[in-house]
Amino acid sequence: MNMITTVSTADSERVALRAPFGARPLWQRSALIAGPILLLAAGATYLGGDKPAAAAPPPPMVTVAAPLEREISQWDDYVGRFEASRSVEVRPRVSGAITAVHFIDGAIVRQGQLLFTIDPRPFAAALAEARAGVATAASDLALAENDLGRATRLLAEEAVSRSDVDRLTARVRATRAALAAAQARVRARALDVEFTQVRAPIGGRISDRKIDAGNLVSAGDGGATLLTTINALDPIYFTFDVPESLFLKTAREGQAKGRPAQTAEIRLQDEAGYNWHGRLDFTDNGINQTSGTIRARAIVANPTYFLAPGMFGNMRLSDGGTIPALLIPDTAVRVDQARKIVLVVGKGDTVAAKPVETGPLVGGLRAIRSGISKTDRIIIQGVQFAQPGAKVHPRVTRITLNTAPTAKVAMSATPSASQATIVGN
């Protein structure tokens, strides 16, 4: 029996989709190949198409100014200590008992002022005895001279022999020597009496007494008792060590300028300004091989005795000369590897970098020794936004100088002046 079965169109399409690629119709195979190619081409066209160009950012705003031109005095900076210009240990020159102390511990004493009294009675007795010896020697001399005179007159009459006259002459000479010795003993005993009053050998500030009244003190070259000490404080010394590099620089500059007098200004640890003034008066005769420094000293007036030995101080030393300098803010100086540069705005508002040699800080500004001119437009603000070769939008201003003293002194790592001041300030 023949049966006829009807196959739907949807079933036939599903069967066709599951058919192998080679058994499919030509149009299906073409569509499967061309479809991905067309999708790839459309994607490439979309991704590779031209986009609208983004707008260029405006040039950064920077502040520029011409360097400030001033005459400055350069100073080398040191740290040192004050020392007494003279120091004396007061010791007795005769032995005895201290009977009185005539000063207040720590007071200012003048030269020749009485400090201690040693019991003078033994020495006064010795002086009286020496004076008696002088009287005896003088009497012997007078007798010897009279005898010699009589013998000389009798010698003319040949009443005495020549030998008797010679003996009398020798006796006169001996008694004269004895008199001289007795007179010397008087002077020595008088000195002992004088030494019982111990007086200040120099003026200055005295220390405390080491011996009270009632104690025995001894004299002698090696074992004399220490009574007190006196430090001369007006003037006072300020001693410091100079590195070899700075010593060489100062020596060469001194030769070039004829070695002018070097002035020193000193500030104490609690001072903002340099209130103490002096001059360099001594440099040692050799460099210390261990530290590589040479010892130097400045002499400072101290009429009020305020400065005391042992105080620390910061000193700046000048050779008295002045130099022209260009001053810019310290923040305008940038470090580029091993060199220092400043950024300037040139023609067409284009940034350029100039290597510079820096100097000390002056009133909050950095002195520039070389590398820029007074007509350059230095970028002093917005340095971080400027790059060499790029354009900027400059805003012109002026550099001002801060003349107020700073509490902290800037130190320089290079062997050059670490500070400077404007001439006239």
Image (spheres, helix red, strand yellow):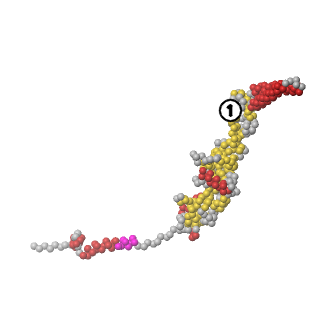
* Residue 43 inside the magenta-drawn segment: yes
**Residue extent of the magenta highlight:** 41-48
Q: Quadrant of residue 38?
A: bottom left
Measuring from the top left, give residue 151's x and y in whole percent.
86, 25
Is residue 241 left or right of 385 when viewed as pictured?
A: right
User: Above or below — where is 219 with respect to 234?
Assistant: above
Coordinates of residue 395 in the picture (x, y in percent): 60, 66
Q: Quadrant of residue 149?
A: top right
Q: Residue at x 62, y 51 (%)?
A: 247
Left or right relative to 273: residue 194: right
Task: Work out which residue is located at the far top of the displayed protein and give it.
Answer: 159
On whether residue 315 falls in the magenta region, the answer is: no
Q: Does 292 sit left or right of 206 as displayed?
A: left
The answer to which of 323 and 205 lies nearer the viewer is 323
Q: Residue furthest right?
A: 157
The majority secondary structure of the magenta stretch comes to helix
Q: Is residue 425 left or right of residue 7?
A: right
Q: Position of residue 155 (x, y in %)?
A: 87, 26
Regarding residue 241, the answer to whether it shows in the image is: no
Quadrant (top left/top right/bottom left/bottom right) for the C terminus: bottom right
Extreme-front residue of the structure: 158
Q: Residue at x 71, y 43 (%)?
A: 234
Q: Which residue is mark 1?
A: 221
The residue sitting at 41% across, 73% down in the picture is 49
Quadrant the N terminus occupies: bottom left
- The answer to whether one can see residue 130 in this image is yes
- Give the quarter of the image for residue 51: bottom left
Q: Position of residue 406 (x, y in %)?
A: 64, 52
Residue type pointed to by label 1: Asp
Q: Which residue is located at x 60 percent, y 50 percent?
A: 244
Q: Nearer the viewer, residue 48 or 177?
A: 177
Q: What element does badge 1 sit on?
A: loop
